[in-house]
Image: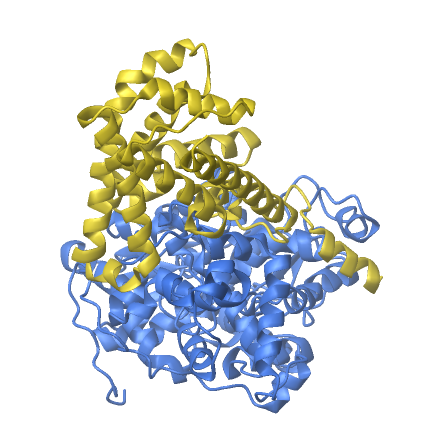
């Protein structure tokens, strides 16, 4: 094995561990932190199914963002839907044989990359053009967009412009999963693509990318509006009550 | 009215988003609480040597106790959706009044002390040390937020700046930088029984005087009972209803409704305050202590129902938190909540809003009105923030919007809503909520009222609206003060039950 393969193999195991363990830890932390008071933003659903529907509308359609600002919504939604299709398409590099629906979305997934990058470009433009958004943007906000655009553009290069040896790449990715390691193709654009993706995985658990698991734990969105019917009490609050009694 | 020491924004009929002006209201600072109230509430009253440690410790404590704070610190992506949603930003153009920037004042400290990137590369992620300058910035801008939750409606993750403002104020309290206005009120309500510091005998006199006034006015002996054991209903209302104009007109309205319904009811000298400023500081225990007075009064008087008068934040605390804090509600399995819940009449929601009560009677045909008595008024309704975005009325989501409007339409002929983007869940705060209703914050109160004043002006111009009806004691006091700055008569504001009071027919 070349040292390049050793390096990329190591990077990917490291990135996968950081990503999975990091996000799992965050989810554990969010779920273990109590929400002591009933604070859904009302009007709010009064049943579990209503909450599930509200959450689904937020996650799939970005309902609140739509109410808020149509430009951010258009760019944000394009980017996220594009990314989702692109990610689903990438399943094919981790399975043999490839599932039917992965096969089916392949062409959509390929062209979704344009939507993804266009959305990101729009979001980035706002960071320069809108004075309010410029004011709140930190260096990491710009770098995050650069990173995602870098991933998108490098991916599009190897898909549409300078095809990489996709069979060899798949051997490499399947090898990572089965611990039967294969050489990583020494295509510079592919290597950039892979390195940026690994970087994204590594920073995920310590960055604003936590909005992805975070939304599911947001009390203003995931709580039922039923405080008169149900006594809602956090463990630390009822312990306090017992101490007093 | 004394001349304003600041520029009052120009009234229009639509609120444009301003270009940012850094530091526009950095000078706004409400008075800091002195030793008395701080000591009573268990806080220090000046910065101790280890203030920074105390602040960080408190932040860690709150991060472990409140999922909202924990998630909201991490989840923001700086998308900008909230940047034009806060009435204080729209009225001042100070970028720190954009919800995300207000949150960022805390987030930059959170990142520095609680996250890996903030510890190793603060410049990259906008992390910052907690310094006295930052603390002063917190004090200034966490008292330029009325905790109205408008931003939380529009945030794609539901980030509620109110939760962060509350945490900020709680941390400030713990290092000795409490706010005079709110903390003095928290002492009064606990020592005397209400926010105005009105003792029992004075309350008794006031109520007797009001009874005489009503009888002189209508010829009907409408009673205002106080501390009546065995009454069916305990009415808990903001203490402003006893003394302030136009609040007292609504109190008269509630009494007339109870009289017409022929029900036995009582006020309580112990629970002579619905308001709970514990909410504003985000201190669970203080909020609980203040709320416990209601439970105690209900148990002592043996009432079957608890009804809450016109007050926005009080209704949020009552509707959303009383069951948690005091067991007023249903579904408690523990002896503490069962004790009260077995006493309450299970045919009715507990607690109940006075508007739910009145609307229920209207629907049953139990109240009669002469709507023409309100004909000199062309009415619009201001949705108060805590009622709109932190509570409900009736059985359906959104009942908090329809029920008060239904009452108005049942008692008056002329009603017009303000523009859709300024009412309902998108309602604009009056500018004086969340512990800001104090003269030392008059500049921010006047400027923060701009979006509401513009919306009111638009219906005043187009439909000739001349009456701003609402159901919040703070909004009433705020508008009474602020309407004249924008060229409106202060008598144009009043409660929904003031309208009920005008039109109701008594036998």
Assign the C terminus of chain A to one quadrant of the image: bottom right
Residue A47 location (% of width, % of height)? 56, 33
| B2 vs B413, nearest the viewer | B2
Residue B55 location (% of width, % of height)? 58, 75
The correct choice, above or below, for B262 with respect to A188 in the image is below
Confirm whether residue B167 shows in the render.
yes
Q: Is residue B458 left or right of residue A184?
A: left
Confirm whether residue B362 shows in the render.
no
Q: Is residue B55 left or right of residue B492?
A: right
Residue B448 location (% of width, % of height)? 31, 69
The correct choice, above or below, for B173 with respect to B289 in the image is below
| A1 vs B324, nearest the viewer | A1
| Palette colour of chain B | blue
- Tell me the residue at 59%/47% (across/down): A30
- Tell me the residue at 20%/73% (across/down): B9
| B364 vs B290, nearest the viewer | B290
| Palette colour of chain A | yellow
Residue B254 location (% of width, % of height)? 52, 59
- Tell me the residue at 61%/55% (across/down): B321
């Amino acid at each position: 094995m070349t040292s390049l393969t050793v390096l990329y193999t190591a990077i990917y195991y490291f990135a996968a561990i950081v990503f999975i363990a990091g996000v799992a830890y965050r989810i554990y932390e969010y779920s273990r932190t109590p929400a002591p008071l009933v604070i859904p933003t009302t009007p709010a659903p009064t049943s579990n199914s209503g909450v599930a529907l509200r959450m689904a509308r937020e996650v799939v359609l970005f309902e609140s963002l739509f109410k808020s600002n149509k430009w951010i919504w258009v760019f944000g939604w394009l980017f996220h839907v594009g990314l989702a299709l692109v990610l689903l398409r990438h399943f094919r590099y981790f399975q043999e044989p490839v599932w039917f629906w992965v096969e089916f979305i392949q062409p959509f997934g390929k062209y979704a990359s344009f939507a993804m990058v266009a959305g990101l470009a729009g979001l980035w433009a706002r960071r320069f053009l809108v004075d309010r958004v410029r004011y709140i943007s930190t260096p990491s906000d710009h770098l995050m967009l650069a990173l995602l655009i870098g991933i998108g553009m490098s991916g599009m290069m190897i898909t549409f412009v300078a095809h990489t040896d996709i069979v060899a790449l798949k051997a490499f990715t399947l090898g990572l999963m089965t611990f039967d390691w294969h050489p990583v193709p020494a295509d510079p654009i592919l290597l950039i693509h892979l390195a940026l993706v690994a970087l994204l995985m590594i920073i995920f658990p310590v960055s604003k990318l936590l909005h992805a698991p975070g939304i599911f734990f947001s009390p203003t969105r995931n709580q039922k509006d039923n405080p008169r019917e149900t006594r809602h009490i956090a463990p630390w609050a009822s312990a306090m009550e017992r101490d007093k009694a | 009215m004394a001349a304003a020491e600041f520029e009052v924004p120009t009234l229009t009929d639509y609120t444009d988003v301003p270009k940012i002006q850094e530091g526009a209201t950095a000078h706004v600072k409400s008075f800091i609480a002195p030793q008395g109230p701080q000591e009573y509430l268990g806080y220090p009253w000046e910065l101790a040597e280890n203030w920074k440690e105390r602040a960080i410790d408190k932040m860690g404590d709150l991060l472990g106790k409140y999922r909202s704070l924990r998630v909201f610190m991490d989840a923001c992506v700086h998308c900008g959706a909230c940047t034009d949603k806060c009435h204080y930003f729209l009225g001042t153009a100070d970028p720190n009044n954009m919800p995300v920037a207000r949150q960022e004042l805390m987030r930059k400290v959170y990142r520095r002390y609680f996250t890996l990137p903030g510890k190793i590369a603060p410049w990259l992620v906008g992390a910052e040390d907690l310094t006295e300058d930052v603390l002063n910035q917190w004090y200034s801008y966490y008292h330029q937020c009325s905790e109205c939750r408008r931003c939380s409606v529009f945030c794609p993750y539901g980030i509620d700046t109110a939760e962060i403002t509350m945490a900020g104020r709680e941390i400030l309290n713990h290092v000795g930088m409490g706010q005079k206005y709110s903390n003095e009120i928290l002492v009064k309500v606990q020592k005397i029984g209400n926010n105005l510091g009105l003792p029992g005998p004075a309350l008794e006199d006031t109520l007797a005087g009001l009874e005489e006034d009503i009888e002189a006015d209508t010829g009907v002996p409408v009673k205002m009972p106080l501390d009546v054991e065995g009454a069916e209903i305990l009415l808990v209302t903001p203490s402003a209803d006893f003394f302030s104009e136009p609040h007292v007109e609504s109190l008269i309205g509630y009494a007339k409704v109870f009289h017409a319904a022929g029900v036995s009811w009582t006020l309580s000298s112990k629970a002579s305050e619905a308001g709970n400023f514990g909410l504003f500081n985000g201190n669970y225990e203080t909020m609980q202590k203040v709320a416990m007075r209601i439970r105690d009064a209900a148990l002592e008087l043996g009432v079957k129902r608890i009804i809450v008068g016109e007050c926005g934040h009080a209704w949020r605390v009552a509707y959303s938190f009383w069951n948690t804090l005091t067991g007023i509600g249903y579904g408690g399995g523990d002896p503490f909540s069962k004790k009260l819940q077995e006493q309450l009449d299970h045919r009715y929601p507990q607690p109940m809003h006075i508007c739910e009560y009145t609307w229920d009677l209207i629907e049953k045909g139990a109240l009669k009105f002469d709507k023409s008595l309100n004909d000199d008024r062309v009415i619009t309704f201001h949705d108060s923030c805590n009622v709109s975005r932190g509570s409900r009325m009736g059985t359906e989501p959104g009942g908090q919007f329809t029920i008060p409007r239904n009452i108005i339409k049942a008692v008056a002929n002329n009603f017009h809503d303000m523009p859709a983007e300024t009412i309902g869940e998108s309602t604009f705060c009056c500018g004086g909520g969340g512990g800001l209703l104090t003269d030392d914050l008059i500049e921010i109160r006047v400027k923060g009222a701009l979006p509401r004043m513009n919306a009111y002006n638009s219906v005043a111009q187009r439909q000739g609206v001349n009456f701003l009806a609402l159901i919040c004691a703070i909004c009433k006091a705020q508008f009474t003060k602020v309407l004249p700055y924008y060229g409106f008569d202060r008598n144009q504001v009043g409660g929904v039950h003031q309208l009920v009071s005008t039109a109701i027919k008594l036998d």
